[in-house]
């Protein structure tokens, strides 16, 4: 398809990655990255943090990220490149700001595989104690790295198979859960959405900062802009579709689980340190077999397909930044046979394994990783919204103020409140990471490697106000 290739050449790049992904592949990638059954693993934490309003926390997350997805769609139309927020912010505002945005989202993407592998390994170890956590970690990392190194088509096929499996498990839970409620195991209530006895905006937004972990991944679709057959249009549609579908699935399963939770007040007071609250609700729905099914499905989903597509996303970000000489050049090397950034894939595998093994030695390893991931992503999303305003309104003089001013500012405001109410430790560690990124940026300037993006000027000339209507 010549259109995407010509668009890529406008920015001074050659088509090195293989354009093999259709809309349905992109949609499946986004769905599997977000994991349709993701709330099963953190249901108890969100329930406790929200004062029982777990559905409310997920609903706010959906609303906030709908605006973010819209901003992504605007920027991918202007810059249909790999690298996602790094490229969009860099080209929309300026290369140095783009570097900071890329550094922030890197905190999300480079830690996500480690978190996923660790959660899955711990869960599988609980199911099969004879196999240690470290061995599960090695197995998950090795399996995903091999598949990703074989090419994007192989990854797409595998994610489709795993997605179908996750959806089957989810609908089994929903079917038995709804039947249990109808037959008296629970009573329908609006309290999971809104409970006047516990409601508080700070409380709910703080819980949303945890719940948003389940949504991270829809933005990873934008990393595949140079591997999508339909170009920017397919990317935008897939992001919106994945967010909408998973949002509905998240709300449905958490609502049913909240109704079936045997002692809601105890869960709010004591939290869910073992991470078993959802499985307890599943046991209420239909017995131990359903609890075991949900637990094993969650472990496999996080350890294989979800961590696999996370590895794809971060490897493309490293590839894009290295291609622009902002990271070591070896990360920009592409396998001629498989058309994938193999060096970046293997580096991510090594970092994920090392971090997973290290965090496994800490009692709060999973909690620390989750908090840092959310902070990095939300910070990058804020810069994404700002880039839409700067690029379209200030630089291109767009008259579409709804799409290019009102929508991004609304999304940025919601995310700012979520970040403000996030875990204090996550805020501190997150700002330390951003500070390190600023120091690296200063080092680039001092060594004569000032961040520059290929084809930046032509991109600015390409978009005119007359062509910006949505």
Image (cartoon, rainbow, N blue to C red):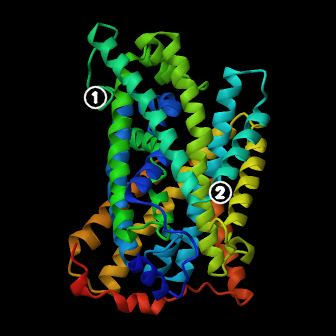
Q: Name above or below for residue 207 compared with residue 150.
A: above
Q: Is residue 201 visible?
A: no
Across and down, in percent, residue 274 comes to 61, 24
Residue 384 left/right relative to 340:
left
Closer to the camera in the image, 179 or 339? 339
Element under disc 2: loop
**Residue drawn at 40 percent across, 23 percent down:** 172
Q: In which quadrant of the rendered view does residue 134 lie?
A: top right
Q: Which residue is labeled 2 in the image? A: 150
Across and down, in percent, residue 433 comes to 65, 61
Residue 242 disc label: none
Across and down, in percent, residue 279 comes to 51, 20
Residue 196 disc label: 1
**Residue drawn at 45 percent across, 18 percent down:** 281
Q: Is residue 383 visible?
A: yes
Across and down, in percent, residue 438 comes to 64, 73
């Amino acid at each position: 398809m010549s259109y995407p290739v010509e668009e890529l050449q406008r920015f001074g790049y050659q088509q090195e990655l293989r354009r093999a992904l259709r809309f349905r592949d992109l949609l499946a990638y986004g769905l599997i990255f977000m994991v349709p059954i993701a709330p099963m693993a953190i249901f108890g934490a969100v329930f406790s943090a929200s004062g029982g309003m777990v559905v409310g926390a997920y609903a706010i997350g959906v609303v906030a990220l709908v605006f973010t997805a819209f901003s992504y769609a605007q920027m991918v139309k202007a810059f249909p490149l790999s690298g996602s927020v790094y490229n969009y912010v860099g080209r929309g505002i300026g290369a140095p700001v783009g570097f900071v945005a890329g550094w922030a989202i890197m905190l999300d993407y480079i830690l996500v595989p480690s978190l996923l592998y660790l959660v899955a390994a711990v869960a599988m170890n609980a199911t099969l104690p004879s196999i240690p956590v470290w061995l599960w970690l090695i197995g998950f990392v090795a399996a995903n790295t091999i598949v990703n190194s074989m090419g994007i088509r192989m990854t797409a096929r595998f994610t489709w198979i795993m997605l179908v499996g996750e959806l089957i498990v989810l609908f089994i839970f929903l079917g038995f859960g709804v039947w249990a409620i109808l037959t008296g195991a629970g009573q329908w209530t609006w309290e999971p959405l809104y409970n006047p006895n516990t409601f508080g905006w700070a409380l709910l937004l703080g819980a949303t900062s945890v719940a948003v972990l389940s949504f991270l991944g829809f933005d990873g679709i934008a990393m595949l802009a140079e591997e999508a057959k339909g170009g920017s249009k397919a990317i935008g549609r897939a992001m919106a579709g994945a967010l909408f579908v998973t949002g509905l699935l998240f709300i449905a399963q958490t609502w049913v689980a909240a109704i079936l939770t045997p002692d809601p007040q105890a869960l709010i007071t004591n939290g869910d340190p073992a991470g078993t609250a959802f499985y307890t609700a599943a046991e209420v729905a239909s017995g131990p077999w359903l609890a075991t099914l949900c637990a094993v499905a969650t472990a496999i989903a996080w350890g294989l397909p979800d961590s696999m597509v996370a590895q794809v996303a971060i490897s493309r970000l490293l590839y894009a930044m290295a291609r622009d000489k902002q990271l070591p050049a070896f990360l920009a090397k592409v396998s001629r046979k498989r058309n994938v950034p193999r060096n970046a894939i293997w580096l991510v595998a090594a970092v994920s394994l090392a971090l997973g093994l290290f965090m496994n030695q800490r009692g709060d390893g999973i909690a620390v990783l989750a908090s840092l991931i959310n902070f990095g992503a939300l910070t990058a999303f804020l810069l994404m919204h700002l880039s839409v305003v700067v690029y379209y309104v200030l630089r291109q003089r767009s008259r579409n103020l709804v799409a290019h001013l009102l929508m991004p500012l609304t999304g940025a405001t919601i995310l700012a409140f979520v970040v403000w109410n996030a875990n204090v430790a996550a805020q501190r560690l997150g700002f330390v990471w951003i500070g390190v990124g600023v120091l690296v940026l200063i080092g680039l300037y001092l060594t004569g490697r000032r961040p520059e993006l290929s084809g930046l000027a032509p991109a600015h000339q390409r978009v005119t106000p007359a062509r910006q209507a949505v």
